[in-house]
Amino acid sequence: MATAERKAQSARVDATRNRERIIAAAREAFVEHGPTVPLDAIAHRAGVGNATLYRHFADRQELIHVVASYSMARITEQAEAALDEEPDAFEALRRFVHRAADERVGALCSLLFEGFDKNDPHVVDARLRLEAAVTRLMDNARESGELRPDVGLGDLMVAITQLTRPVAGTACAQVERFMHRHLQLFLDGLRAPARSELSGTAVTFEDFETT
Amino acid sequence: MATAERKAQSARVDATRNRERIIAAAREAFVEHGPTVPLDAIAHRAGVGNATLYRHFADRQELIHVVASYSMARITEQAEAALDEEPDAFEALRRFVHRAADERVGALCSLLFEGFDKNDPHVVDARLRLEAAVTRLMDNARESGELRPDVGLGDLMVAITQLTRPVAGTACAQVERFMHRHLQLFLDGLRAPARSELSGTAVTFEDFETT
Amino acid sequence: MATAERKAQSARVDATRNRERIIAAAREAFVEHGPTVPLDAIAHRAGVGNATLYRHFADRQELIHVVASYSMARITEQAEAALDEEPDAFEALRRFVHRAADERVGALCSLLFEGFDKNDPHVVDARLRLEAAVTRLMDNARESGELRPDVGLGDLMVAITQLTRPVAGTACAQVERFMHRHLQLFLDGLRAPARSELSGTAVTFEDFETT
Amino acid sequence: MATAERKAQSARVDATRNRERIIAAAREAFVEHGPTVPLDAIAHRAGVGNATLYRHFADRQELIHVVASYSMARITEQAEAALDEEPDAFEALRRFVHRAADERVGALCSLLFEGFDKNDPHVVDARLRLEAAVTRLMDNARESGELRPDVGLGDLMVAITQLTRPVAGTACAQVERFMHRHLQLFLDGLRAPARSELSGTAVTFEDFETT
DNA sequence: TATGAATGAGGATTCATTCAT
DNA sequence: TATGAATGAATCCTCATTCAT
């Protein structure tokens, strides 16, 4: 019986490894080539047959869903860690922004939104957690007087998303040279006192979500 | 014969009008649906047959090339107009940035780079003109002490590109609500005195071009 | 202009010929191999590329729809001709049954029902016409005392359908050797006076339709 | 060792049960969805893994073979029972026809023929037995003057097959409402005296087999 | 032996591009 | 020249069958 269990287990171990390889390959492929990269290419990169990919993920949607969920969870962890570990409020915000960038959230946010089931309870939960953490980061920084008051959660999230996306027509590595500089410049623009008046109104997370 | 000539003439006029319709349709379609939008869809939007599109543009590359060149020219004009008309150096820069955004340069820059023949003399010319104008805008602002000295031309161009791209999974109109706010925040971050130290080195236009 | 028109026309003539070739090929292929025959095979049999088939018919449904509609119209014509031309009531019915068989209605009825848009007005019309004609054929025969009274329209239609379907695993030609014999035996069973009592109730056209 | 033996035994018992479950599931699935139903679906319906199905049956052919053989044996039993138990000759024939229908022979005859190894000795035996029994049923009825003399064994078998097949595009249950009525009408047509002249010649079992 | 997983081949469909009128 | 139509290559996805545990 122990043998049988081990057998069952090891079959599962193999499959699990494949699953993770596929997710990793998909993540890279999505970051490099966008959300329409051929699934066969992902399968190939993962070193499995194309049908294996379909065994694990019914369709592109499902794969995107999983990859994006992973990313979102990692970002949320970064936000929570920054809250916990960083005494200075603006520094915590800054740290979160740069760490989120390292997660390639920009590249993956396209996935987060393209054909994401926004009513899936897991997704809703993940969003609420992320929203809560980043809201606290911003509230803290605003209260400490370091963050200009006329910016909202959505402003930050959109800017992170946009500034960390692969530069069009550019090899992937390239964007990493730039994005931290540009996020830093953006963060400098976020600092109080505001150096200009902004058009429109602060973008909230709802705006962001419902885009 | 006079009739034949007139016919030929009017045919040429028609052809020109078709060409421009196609370019306009392509511009809109690229902005709305990205650089992979079906060419048939562009032809349809332009109100011509698909083969007519191919008569004017050998392939997608060529169409992209032309559309992107148009855009680049318009942006260059904006930069030059800002130089000419705006006495305050930083204000000129600011004006250029927002006007470039209105040209949807972000959406179109994906085109600018995807399979662009960078050695085409016309392209080289256009680039040099754009580079010259924006360099002067930045130099002026730097000299007037309003622009932090640690940023380069490429920093600005990449940020404009990224912040004005359509937000992933978002209806096109949505991005216009955001982009001017975010560009403004970025501009605030560009102002002297610098509020932080930037990682890496200033991104030059060469970096930008060779990406 | 005459030339232009002829050109346009002849382009259309070509396309029309292709369309008809595809329909004919589809008809044969459906009869021989059933409704799941590969569309590529139909295209090949029609002597056109696979995409040409898709230009004419958006998907399998549409092709089936057209082929089945053709068939139904032909059968209806047969029913109406039998009504018009055959003085003897049962003979008219008999003639209709055998002619419908020659249309391979059995083979094609699978198509008539598999994924047929029953609410399409054209389909509704065609059905009503067919129903009306066959109802009159049966009413006439019942009134003349030649048709047993305990059978309905649906009984006849289902039996025609079933007895003219390709015999499973059989080359197509084979069924034609049998079907007229078996339809004739069935017709003999339909004659008054009834030689037995039937279970259930007469199958109406509604039963047939809503199956 | 006794334990090992018991294990082996129970393994064999399990295997036999699995085999039978698969056959039953296959029978249902074939009747409901036709001979191309995915084998995985059959395995799932049988509650076994797909590979278990392949352990028992090398491929679809073999499974079809077995299922069809089962069916044929049951029909043969029905024919023999009718011969033994029914004193009236035509009533015996009638009883056989309706019982064969209940075996869903129509649905399964598609299997009987599609890729059946007709030279397999078991198949030959089964056929000979079935042929003998039904021939006697028909001979008896012909001799008693109740069956028209111009019909052959194959006429009957084909008609049973066709009239009991699932009506195209119809839920399975539906056909059972019809088939007994239509078989009865057909049987009425078979009764002597013949009410019409049949085209062609009586279909023999050989015709049927070699189709 | 039984199983879940892996795989490749095949069919449906789309789209860039070419052809014929 | 402008056009509708034709085409083949590429992609998604399914399924029969094999493999490894």
Image (spheres, coloured by chain):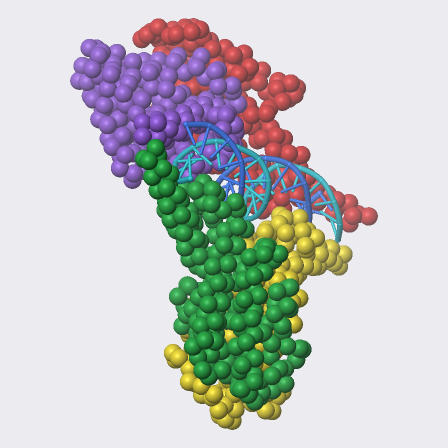
Chain colours: A yellow, B green, C purple, D red, E blue, F cyan
In the current view of this chain or complex, which residue is farthest to the left? C143
Q: For the point 43% across and 19% down, which residue is it? A: D159
Q: For the point 49% across and 82% down, which residue is it? A: B89
Residue C182 seen from this side = no
Q: For the point 53% across and 37% down, which residue is it? A: D37
Establish if A207 lies above or below A4: below
Q: For the point 42% across and 63% down, which residue is it? A: B172
| Percent of width and height locating residue D58 | 67, 34
Q: Quadrant of residue D97?
A: top left
Residue B89 seen from this side = yes
Foreground of the two, C89 or D46 = C89
| Percent of width and height locating residue D27 | 53, 35
| Percent of width and height locating residue B150 | 62, 82
Establish if C81 lies above or below A118: above
Total number of numbered discs in the rendering: 0
In the current view of this chain or complex, which residue is farthest to the bottom? A144
| Percent of width and height locating residue B53 | 45, 45
Q: Quadrant of residue D51?
A: top right
